[in-house]
Image (cartoon, rainbow, N blue to C red):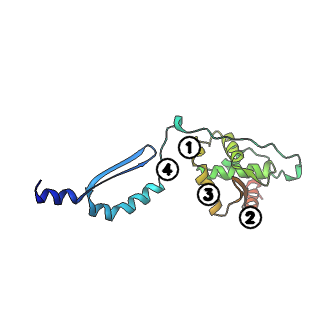
Amino acid sequence: MTDNDEASSSDKSKIRIKLGKLEIKFEGSESFLENHLPNLVELLASVTPIESESEIEEEESELLEEKESSKTKKIDMSTSTIANKLGAASGRDLVLAACAHLHLVKGHEKYERKNILAEMKTATSYYKKTYTNNLTAMLQRLVKSGELNEIGENVYALEAKKAKGLESSLSGK
């Protein structure tokens, strides 16, 4: 090995990043990695890995029954109808529709993650299996945006103003 070979091989770096089934390999100059690695890591952190439907685990879900009190029932719509009226175009929107159904139709002030998931699944035209794996992230975003309150471990409630806003828009008032 010559001096030039040693210099060129020490200037080269290798990196391999694996995220689920996504794998990225790079071999190149250290300066490229120094300049671009932080952006690449940031980009990868924001990407949800694509998984085939057969690899998605089935999470426990449980439908809540409607409460006996008729006073709590503010609207009479399915989760699918609520999703339609809200123009649901994402999993996040479907989470809100499910929470609205649990709160405004079934009369529950709080509900567990498994109840939200079960309601989402009833909206068959809107629900996608990938929403199950992304539910944690969707719930976290809704909590951070102030639309949902996290009142316990995996226990949620619509924020009061959000509940009133949804009721108003769904009832046409």
As measured in the structure, the alpha-carbon distance from the residue carrying label 3 to the one carrying label 2 is 18 Å
State how far apart marks 4 and 2 are (Cα).
31 Å
Residue 92 lies left or right of residue 103; in this view the side is left
Residue under pointer 4: 48
- Residue 150, percent from left and from top: 70, 59
* Dot 1 crowding, Cα within 10 Å, few <14, some 14–19, many 20+: some
Q: How far apart in space, not on screen, are marks 2 and 1 (Cα)?
A: 29 Å
Secondary structure under badge 2? helix
From the viewer's perspective, is the residue at label 3 or at label 2 nearer? 3
Disc 1 marks which amino acid? Thr
Nearest the camera: 75 or 48?
Answer: 48
Going from N to C along the chain, the mark reached first, 3 or 1, is: 1
Q: Secondary structure at mark 4?
A: loop
37 horizontally vs 99: left or right: left
Amino acid type indicated by mark 4? Thr
Between discs 2 and 1, the one toward the N terminus: 1
Name the residue tied to disc 2. Answer: 161
Decide which of 131, 169 is in the foreground and name it.
Answer: 131
Badge 2 density bin: few <14, some 14–19, many ≥20, Cα 10 Å? few
Q: Which residue is mark 1?
A: 130
Q: Work out whether residue 146 can be spotted.
A: yes
Q: Which residue is mark 3?
A: 140
Vertical placement of residue 154 versus 122, above or below: below
Instruction: Tell me, yes or no, whether the two marked residues, 4 and 2, touch with CB atoms within 8 Å.
Output: no
